[in-house]
Amino acid sequence: MKIFGFVPARMAASRFPGKPLFPIAGRPLIEHCFLRGRMFNRWDNYFLTTCDEELQAFALQHNYPIIMTSHRHTRALDRVAEAAENCGEDISDSDIVVCVQGDEPLMTPAMIEAVVTPFESDKSIRGTLLAVPIVEESLYQNPDIVKIAHDRNGDILYTSRSPIPYSKTFSVTIGAKRVGGIFGFRWEFLKWFTQQPESPLELSEACDSNRICDNGFRQRMALIEPQPYYSVDSPKDVELVENALKHDPLWGTY
């Protein structure tokens, strides 16, 4: 089983245009994501992927491998699938394609490992996603944060920007979890995914994982321990990330 990684990004992000090149602690957001993801030591190959010439120029300047894709994609997984198709690698149907979102500057190689491991222990698993426990009410209430409903086996039932599971009073005991921005797929399943039209729940929640739920399939949750973990969805998130980086064990190693 080979493992291929792709970091998708685009400059026209609806809530934060230009964010891939926005400086965080002195480095562009996309560079944090790419370099931290590159620390995972089991890649068979690993790429940036975009439709934007600005990001292509940045990657070429730093000698980062990059694959250009169509401008038509609005969902990261569709961009990753096109990049995997055109990356020049012989990817078999059972190989793993990992999407490492380009707005997760606090992710670690251990998180990628968590997303990959379920495929090795259970051949029936077709897709996984990183799940992070929510310990702050501000994240639970934040519509930029995609929350998870799952069954007892850890399979995703639904993802939502609303605070789920519902509770009148937030507490860590309700077990709320968020999508962590790292997704794993068997290549055969990702190809299937891209052949399906955008689904009703996907469109209403603006979350492409719901395309899987809407079609009767499941992703396995890769749950990690609670820890500081902030996505960059809007400019206000930059300060949160920069403060977290001051205590981050990987900061200064890349």
Image (tube, rainbow, N blue to C red):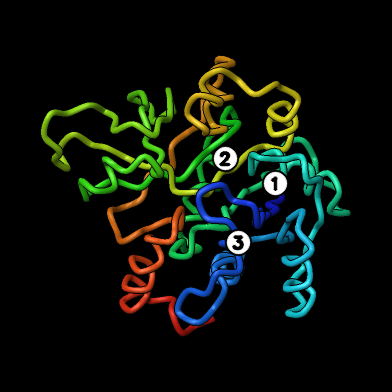
Residue type at tag 2: Phe
Residue indicated by mark 2: 119
- Asked whether the beta carbons under mark 2 and mark 1 sit within 8 Å of each other, the answer is yes
Residue type at tag 3: Gly
| Image vertical order of residue 51 relative to residue 105, above or below | above
Q: Quadrant of residue 241?
A: bottom left
- Of tags 3 and 1, the one toward the viewer is 3
- Whole-angstrom CA distance, mark 2 to mark 3, is 35 Å
Q: Which sits in the foreground, 29 or 223?
A: 29
- Mark number, residue 18: 3
| Image vertical order of residue 188 relative to residue 233, above or below | above
SS for dot 2: helix
Query: Could you tell me which residue is drawn at 45 percent across and 79 percent down?
Result: 25
As drawn, is 215 to the left or to the right of 160?
right
First along the sequence among labels 2 and 3: 3
Residue indicated by mark 1: 1
First along the sequence among labels 2 and 1: 1
Query: Could you tell me which residue is drawn at 24 percent across and 48 percent down?
Result: 138
How dense is the environment of label 1, judged by Cα within 10 Å: few (below 14), some, or many (20 and up)? few
Q: Position of residue 117 (x, y in %)?
A: 52, 47
How dense is the environment of label 2, judged by Cα within 10 Å: few (below 14), some, or many (20 and up)? many
Q: Which sits in the foreground, 72 or 33?
A: 72
Q: Position of residue 204 (x, y in %)?
A: 50, 24
Residue type at tag 1: Met
Q: Quadrant of residue 19?
A: bottom right
- Whole-angstrom CA distance, mark 3 to mark 1, is 36 Å
Q: Quadrant of residue 215?
A: top right
Query: Could you tell me which residue is drawn at 41 percent across and 66 percent down?
Result: 238
First along the sequence among labels 3 and 1: 1
